[in-house]
Amino acid sequence: MFVGGLAYSINNQVLEDLFKKFGTVTSAQVISDRYTNQSKGFGFVEMADDAEAQKAIAELNGSSLEGRTINVSVARPKEDNNRGDSRNNRDNNSSGRDFFYKGKR
């Protein structure tokens, strides 16, 4: 499950304890910035049983944790997002040169 809107003070143990009320938690991970090690404000939780996970989503989505409203949903696979960078987007029939060269050709 995806858990968003977390306070920066939330750690893996707090996240696991929150979901343990609904069943067996197989993993709970708050995502941190790789350079600063500060929480990014979201995390992922895996539970052993789908029914328990659905109950946790129903109960916790929109609830308050340390003064912040959290979002809990089924995690989706990461989508390939090149954010409109013309160097990585080959569908626009551009060589990417327009991105680098502003003068005469």
Image (tube, grey):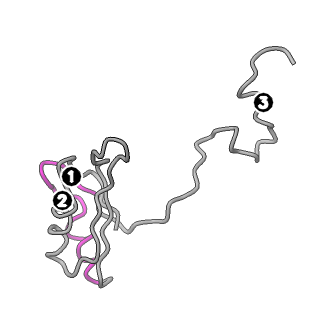
Image point (70%, 39%), residue name: 87
Residue 27 image position (x, y, % from top left): 29, 72
Please state the extent of the stretch shown in magenta in the rendering: 51-71
Residue under label 3: 97
Q: CA distance from mark 1 to mark 2?
A: 5 Å
Residue under label 1: 69
Which amino acid type is marked by label 2? Answer: Ser
Above or below — where is 54 with respect to 64? below
**How many marks do you count on the picture?**
3
Which amino acid type is marked by label 1? Answer: Thr
* Dot 1 or dot 3, earlier in sequence: 1
What label sits on residue 63 in the rendered view?
2
> Neighbour class for label 3 at 10 Å: few (<14), some, many (≥20)?
few
- CB under 8 Å between discs 1 and 3: no
Residue 46 image position (x, y, % from top left): 32, 74
Image point (78%, 30%), residue name: 97
- Element under disc 3: helix
Which amino acid type is marked by label 3? Answer: Arg
* Dot 1 or dot 2, earlier in sequence: 2
| Residue 28 location, quadrant | bottom left
